[in-house]
Amino acid sequence: MGSVTVDRPQGLALLAEGMDLSRRSLPRGIGVLASPGGQVAALTALVALVEVLTPAQVVLAYLYVLPLILLSETARPAAIWRFAVLACGLTLANLVVPEAAPLAASVLANRLLVCGALVLTAGQCLRIQVLQRQRLELQGQLAVEDLRRDFVATLAHDLKTPILGTIATTRSLAAASQRSDGPLVARALATIERGQSRALAQIQTLLEVYRNDAEGLRLQPAELELTRLVEDVIRELSALAEERELTLRLGFGASSQRSPHRLVGDGPQLRRLLENLLLNAIHHSLRGGQIRVDLEAHGSGHRLRIGDSGPGVPEQEITNLFQRFQRLSEERPGSGLGLYLCRQIVEAHGGRIGLRNRPGGGAEIEVLLPRDCLGADGEGG
């Protein structure tokens, strides 16, 4: 028989080349095993090998749960189901591999039970994936909400300081004005003061809206007369309505007589509700028009309707009108938060608010309030 002879220098060269190749291949192999996919493949192959080396009566296929759980941390649902099918196939294949044996019912039943457990484990892994994804989304939303709340609070504080300073300075100048053109200066200063006061009110509305969203609107209920509250607000806003050549009318439904309407509610919040609704009607009414306020009993509560003489509201926008930052027109004053705050106040009292277009033109907002807001647990939002 022939033989191959390799001289010493050539053998040393071949050995060195082999060692160099091993050094280059080893990091790649370690890198593959270090990856999640490599670990799953290695564990799967190990379990399959153990299954082949043990008798079919000994069921070790439940160990496929280990690579399945490892795979579920990063894989998509389709990959998880494919692995579950593969593991079930390998579990049943061990009945005939490495060699076929007489099939016992108990052995088949045990392996089918393991297959069922693998399928259930895959389903639980997918459910855990969904829960983790929801948890991450919720954490992201909470982080964004905290950032937004901090931003709003900081912005409102930075804006309120110069506005309050401007209002105080304007009032001082108006009180000290002794010039011959005093009336002209007084009107200019009054205009500046109104503008700054409106900006301050919008900032306050913004803060209230975000506080109500975060903490809920907490009411301080007390017995009050809604009729008198409506009359007070109308009296306070009558000067603004006259500037716009608008007429404010208060009615009591089918009855032409003034009638008291008593309820248990938060007086300051209800006043804020009425102010916002009337200001909204004034801003959207055409000059020379009329704003009609009707207050009447409705079932066991009260119904308040405020109708303006404006152009009305497009039907497709009515459903979103009481949402945050919803404005009918960029040309109109306001931040889009007034009606949203009105909805918060009404719902905190256990009532309802809605809007409809009147057949004769204009829009009408309807507010339904119960006689006792304590039925709403004194908290809304």
Image: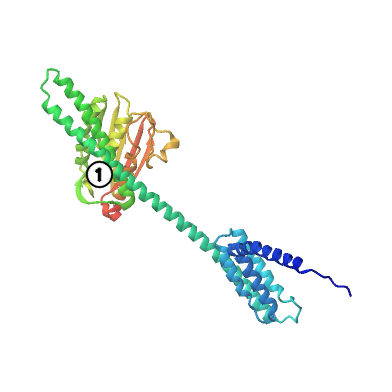
The amino acid type found where label 1 is placed reads: Leu
**Toward which corner of the image does residue 320 lie, by quadrant?**
top left
Would you place residue 168 above or below residue 35 in this image?
A: above
Q: Position of residue 175 (x, y in %)?
A: 12, 28
Q: Position of residue 282 (x, y in %)?
A: 29, 31
Q: Position of residue 309 (x, y in %)?
A: 33, 29
Would you place residue 49 above or below residue 40 in this image?
A: below
Residue 292 can be seen, yes or no: yes
**Toward which corner of the image does residue 268 lie, by quadrant?**
top left
Total labels drawn: 1
SS label for mark 1: helix
Along the viewing direction, whichever of 149 and 287 lies nearer the viewer: 149
On the rendered image, what quadrant is the N terminus found in? bottom right
Residue ranking furthest to the top: 180
Would you place residue 45 above or below residue 316 in this image?
A: below
- Tell me which colouring the rendered structure shows: rainbow
Which residue is tagged 1? 270
Residue 273 can be seen, yes or no: no
Q: Residue at x 33, y 40 (%)?
A: 337
Residue ranking furthest to the right: 1
Q: Position of residue 23 (x, y in %)?
A: 64, 64
Along the viewing direction, whichever of 75 and 5 lies nearer the viewer: 5
Report whether 136 appears left or right of 103: left
Along the viewing direction, whichever of 132 and 368 lies nearer the viewer: 132
Label 1 neighbourhood size at 10 Å, few (<14), some (14-19), many (20+)? Answer: some
Q: Residue at x 30, y 50 (%)?
A: 348
Along the viewing direction, whichever of 95 and 244 lies nearer the viewer: 95
Report whether 134 appears left or right of 79: left
**Toward which corner of the image does residue 297 lie, by quadrant?**
top left
